[in-house]
Amino acid sequence: MSNNQPQKNRFGNTVQTDLPDDAPRARQPGHKLRTSNDIVDRSELESGNTQSASVHTLQGQQIQLVHIEEQVGLVRLETAQPASVPNQFTGPSYRNHSERFRFDGHKMLHHLDRVMAWQNGERFSPVHIDMGLTKFCNTACIYCYAVVQNMTKGSMIERDALLRYIEDCGRLGVRSLGFIGDGEPTLNPALYDATVLAGQQGIDTSMATNGLLLDMDRVHELLANMSWIRFNLSAGTPEGFQRVHQSKAKNFDLLVEKIRSLVAIKKEHNYDCTIGLQMVLIPECYDQVLAEAELGAELGVDYFVIKHCSDSEYKEIGIDYKDYASIEDVLKQAESLSTEEYVVQAKWNKIRASEETELYRNGYRKYDVCMGTPFLLQISGNGKIYPCGPFFNKERFYMGDLHDGSFFDLVNGDHYWNVHRDIAESVDVHKDCAIGCRQDYVNKFLWDIRNPPEHINFI
């Protein structure tokens, strides 16, 4: 055991070590640290003179000694986990299980060919496109950003235009499509055929849906071809559902049974499609967080993710991001329900934006230029193409319409690239853009590449 108590170091700062009393000490360890030069002799740990068990361990840990050349290091392992792990600290390892989905960040490192084309000033196809299939919805969620984007009942991308666009994406080498735009995708009857066609073209697809109108007779086509299906559900009870989604309480039970059936079909047929739930965090659903986390576990979905509420540049939804601090303990309690099969995760980077500097809290970015739109494009549910969702209906940034011609030709045309250039050269990201936009993570990555530190070869 260790009896080390906090003490002042030679600089007047409080320090506390965790050196076991019976651990062997190195005789000539080197220079002093900020604590002292009282260092454990790790070679003695291995010699058999002292058992590794004498090293202080936390509850649920065991010690493993690692040999590298003539040196011995000590690694703390969770006793319930295997000792052989390819990556202990980042990525989808057992130490960071939830990161297999990488909800709270980006995946640009896996698309360096497009990054290189961008660096070289070449034209290239988007890696991913977010798109609506309609401009209207069968619920009325009180946090809905699409309302800001001028929803239009009955407006949708027509079948022929949608399928032609999917084929063009295949020719261009677009890698993924997310049917997660400004309207409810299941209101477009071409959804299912478009998903199958995309699969044939080698394009990954996904969908965010309220799920109420999901055609259970055709879900095999979705499960066989989509990478993931996410249900936009910000409630764990019928009462919460009625309050937040402004839909009848009985529809909550309808949705829950559809999700339960979808999970059962996935497991029965061994489909790879990931099924998850997403909550948009607003004060009106704070009391629903734990209920939905428990519901997700009971339904057998793969994950439950909790994200910040995106507000417009005019803050029309009225989100006070500082208020998120009051719910952090509940979010952590929800995350504790994660298991090997079920991930509960809050998108902390954006939820904790209020803890940043005053500038960042008020919308100021950590980059000065938006460079991400060529990598992550967005298309409205009426077929109109814009560089990003917050600029829907702003004609200056209008690129074209899927109903009017070839998407392949558009991406290879001058006007498309002139709009991207206009975004990079003219848009003030600190004032003109929505807080927590879709391209935010991508922009941080590209900004670092475009603005390298000195001495980059000293990696």
Image (spheres, rainbow, N blue to C red):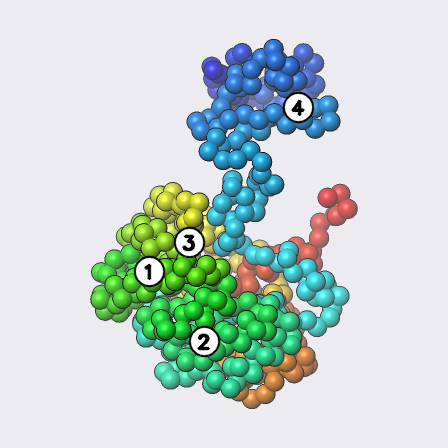
- The crowding category of the residue bearing disc 4, from other C-alpha atoms within 10 Å (few below 14, some 14 to 19, many at least 20), is some
Please tell me in which quadrant of the rendered image residue 41 appears. Answer: top right
Q: Amino acid at mark 1?
A: Arg
Q: Secondary structure at mark 2?
A: helix
Q: Which residue is mark 3?
A: 303
Mark 4 and mark 1 lie on one chain; the one further toward the N terminus is: 4
Rendered residue at 35%/50% (across/down): 297
Q: Residue furthest bottom?
A: 404
Label 4 to label 1, Cα distance in Å? 51 Å
The crowding category of the residue bearing disc 2, from other C-alpha atoms within 10 Å (few below 14, some 14 to 19, many at least 20), is some
Other residues around mark 1 within 10 Å, as few (<14) / some (14–19) / many (≥20):
some
Residue 443 is situated, as x and y percent measured from the top left of the image, at 60, 60
N-terminal of the pair, mark 4 or mark 2, is 4
Q: Nearer the viewer, mark 3 or mark 2?
A: 2
- In the picture, the disc for residue 192 is 2
Disc 2 residue type? Tyr
Q: Are marks 1 and 2 in contact (CB under 8 Å)?
A: no
Mark 4 sits on what residue? 72
Pick the residue in front: 70 or 356: 70
For the residues labelled 3 and 4, the Cα–Cα distance comes to 39 Å
Q: Which of the two discs, 3 and 2, labels the residue nearer the N terminus?
A: 2
**Left or right, residue 97 beside residue 422:** left
> Mark 3 or 1, which is nearer the eye?
1
Whole-number angstrom distance, CA of label 1 to CA of label 2: 20 Å
Dot 1 corresponds to which residue?
A: 260
- Which of pointers 4 and 1 indicates the residue nearer the eye? 1
Q: The disc labelled 4 sits on which kind of residue?
A: Val
- Amino acid type at circle 3 is Tyr
Q: Earlier in the sequence, mark 3 or mark 1?
A: 1
Question: Marks 3 and 2, Cα distance to the nearest angstrom?
Answer: 24 Å
Report helix, strand or loop for mark 4. strand
